[in-house]
Image: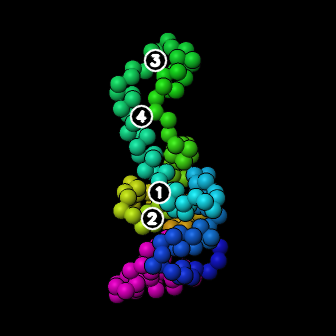
Amino acid sequence: MTARTVPPSLSDPYEAADWLLSRHDWPRQLVARVVLPGEDRPHWLDQLADAYTDLAAHTTAWARYEATHRQPGTYATDADWDAWQAAGPTPSDAAHALAVMSGGEQRMCRLIATLHPTDRAHGWHLADLQFDERGAAFFLDWTLVALTALAWEPTARTALHTLMEVTR
């Protein structure tokens, strides 16, 4: 990992997100499992935020399906279960990629999605701060992004300078 520097432009959340992923391999690999590459596609941060929106919609649709379509019984065959599942709602590829991630991987992607400039709620909360060493290093840089965005405020500016000194 390189020395902590302030991202080049925090007036642009996409640039800040790019800066974070350029510094951390693991989050970059996780995002690559969710978003589709290509210049004709929306920015990867838009795709990641959309994936969380799709996952929430799929989770709701699946709960409705389970409430209205009885599960196969105890003695059902694998084919019965497969047919029941196949008849239910299908997630988008991106939502499926998030759904099969571990809890830690999902928390990391959700933290990244909070950088999206819209007011979408991604369900991230302080309990999600259960990271290993890689996640902790990423979170420190994410905190730099968040504090730098508030650097005009004296308390945030002091916290930013303190964090930069401590993590140098």
- Along the polypeptide, which appears first: circle 4 or circle 2? 4
Eye-nearest disc, 4 or 3: 4
| Secondary structure type for disc 3 | loop
Residue position for label 1:
49
Query: Which label was assigned to residue 116?
Result: 2
Question: What segment is highlighted magenta in the picture?
Answer: 142-168
Pointers 4 and 2 in contact (C-beta within 8 Å): no
Q: Residue at x 47, y 57 (%)?
A: 49
Amino acid bearing label 1: Ala
Left or right, 38 with respect to 165, comes to: right
CA gap, disc 2 and disc 3: 41 Å
On the question of residue 95 being in view, the answer is yes
CA gap between label 1 and label 3 equals 34 Å
Which element is circle 1 on? helix
Q: Looking at the figure, which quarter contains the C terminus?
A: bottom right
Q: Nearer the viewer, residue 141 or 121?
A: 121
Q: Is residue 103 magenta?
A: no
Instruction: Find disc 4 in the rendering and name its residue.
Output: 62
Disc marking residue 168: none
Q: Residue at x 45, y 64 (%)?
A: 116
Q: Which residue is mark 3?
A: 72
Q: CA distance from mark 2 to mark 1?
A: 7 Å
Instruction: Specify the amino acid type for callout 2.
Output: His
Earlier in the chain: of badge 2 and badge 3, it is 3
